[in-house]
């Protein structure tokens, strides 16, 4: 979903809420008018005894006491209404003052992001992070600014790229912005501090302030050794990502795209990989203990040394489409399947030409000189 579509969807939701609120208020007003018309006189006589026709027949002492109590009740009601009005007025002034403070903080944060000094930029990022936490109505705008900041500050991965260039301010920005749908860090080589920020951001306890990492684009991202325990990466695009040695214990990778990803010696214990695209992924020596692989696409997936002995929802059909080795650890009933046994012997998935035939070298063959 594009940014323009997000804005339109948000405006549509606000319009629907406003329309529902108006309809509810109109219905409540109509019911109140009907109640007044139907029971108005009865309620009036019950609330104001002096309006009764037989009021003059009541004993004078009782009338004086009733009128005194009625005046006291009216005064108390007026005081209560005045208190409510004062509270509403104070609350309105507080909201306006707070909005002005947030706007001022937002403006100063933007000024800091444009500074030449790293620590000033870091302060701007942290200020925007606090706005995300304190002001939900401004959180989307703050996240959009941080997304733009990341795109500007984090260079694309190149052979001679210095990972230190992402800096602390980039790490802080990632900590806030990566959880917002539409974050874009394609091809960014992440340094250790940025990886730590991503780790903190993907924790389940961090989701109550930000959106989930749904549909996140991490194509070609360098995440070797990253700690992504319990990360919510549902529908994330990790095509070609380098996750060698990464800890993905309990990670939700449902419907994620991991095509051509590197997951050598990655820890995928208890990971959710249902309907994940693992075509051409390298799961060499990966630990998939208790991983959920329902309908996962494993075409040409490298499983040399991978531990799938307790993987759930794994079928023979899935295994036959992957590259198997004698070191691949499978459930006993899968490993003993005749088709799987034959495929392990061939070391090739179904429909492939593996192993490739080495072309014969052409040229003159030197003869050994006679002894």
Image (cartoon, helix red, strand yellow):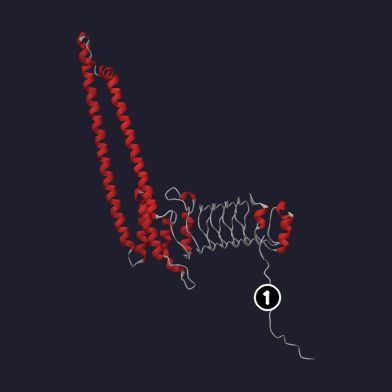
Residue at the right extreme?
A: 371
- 37 vs 275, left or right, is left
What secondary structure is marked by label 1?
loop
Asked if 52 appears above or below 155 in the picture, the reply is above
- 175 vs 276, left or right, is left
Q: Residue at x 37, y 48 (%)?
A: 10
Residue at the front extreme?
A: 351
Between 123 and 287, the one lying in front of the other is 287
Asked if 173 appears above or below 158 in the picture, the reply is above
Q: Quadrant of residue 336?
A: bottom right
Q: Position of residue 146 (x, y in %)?
A: 38, 58
Q: Residue at x 49, y 50 (%)?
A: 204
Q: Position of residue 33 (x, y in %)?
A: 28, 26
- 72 vs 313, left or right, is left
Q: Position of residue 172 (x, y in %)?
A: 41, 59
Between 363 and 280, the one lying in front of the other is 363
Asked if 329 appears above or below 66 in the picture, the reply is below
Q: Quadrant of residue 368?
A: bottom right
Q: Quadrant of residue 278?
A: bottom right
Q: Residue at x 28, y 19 (%)?
A: 43
Give the quarter of the figure containing the C terminus.
Answer: bottom right
Query: What residue did someone put label 1 on?
Result: 359
How many tags in the picture? 1
Between 282 and 129, the one lying in front of the other is 282
């Amino acid at each position: 979903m594009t940014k323009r579509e997000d804005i339109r969807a948000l405006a549509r939701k606000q319009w629907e809420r406003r329309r529902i609120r108006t309809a509810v208020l109109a219905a409540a007003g109509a019911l109140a008018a009907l109640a007044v018309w139907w029971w108005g006189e009865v309620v009036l006589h019950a609330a104001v005894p002096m309006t009764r026709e037989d009021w003059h027949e009541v004993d004078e002492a009782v009338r004086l006491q009733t009128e005194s109590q009625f005046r006291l009740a009216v005064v108390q009601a007026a005081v209560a209404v005045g208190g409510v009005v004062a509270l509403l007025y104070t609350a309105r002034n507080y909201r306006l003052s707070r909005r002005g403070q947030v706007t001022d903080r937002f403006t100063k944060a933007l000024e800091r992001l444009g500074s030449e000094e790293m620590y000033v930029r870091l302060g701007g990022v942290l200020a925007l992070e606090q706005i995300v936490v304190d002001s939900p109505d401004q959180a989307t705008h703050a996240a959009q600014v941080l997304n733009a900041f990341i795109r500007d500050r984090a260079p694309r991965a190149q052979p001679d790229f210095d990972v230190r260039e992402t800096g602390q301010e980039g790490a802080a920005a990632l900590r806030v912005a990566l959880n917002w749908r539409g974050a874009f860090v394609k091809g960014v080589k992440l340094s250790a501090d940025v990886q730590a920020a991503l780790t903190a951001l993907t924790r389940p306890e961090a989701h109550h302030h930000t959106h989930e990492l749904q549909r996140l684009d991490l194509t070609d991202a360098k995440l070797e050794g990253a700690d992504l325990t319990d990360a919510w990466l549902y529908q994330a695009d990790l095509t070609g990502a380098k996750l060698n040695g990464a800890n993905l214990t309990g990670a939700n990778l449902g419907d994620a795209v991991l095509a051509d990803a590197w997951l050598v010696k990655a820890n995928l214990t208890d990971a959710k990989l249902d309907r994940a695209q693992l075509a051409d992924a390298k799961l060499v020596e990966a630990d998939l203990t208790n991983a959920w692989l329902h309908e996962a696409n494993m075409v040409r997936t490298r499983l040399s040394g991978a531990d799938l002995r307790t993987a759930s929802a794994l079928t023979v059909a899935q295994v036959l489409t992957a590259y198997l080795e004698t070191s691949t650890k499978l459930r006993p009933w899968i490993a003993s399947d005749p088709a799987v046994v034959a495929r392990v012997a061939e070391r090739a998935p179904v429909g492939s030409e593996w192993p490739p035939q080495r072309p014969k070298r052409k040229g003159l063959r030197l003869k050994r000189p006679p002894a």
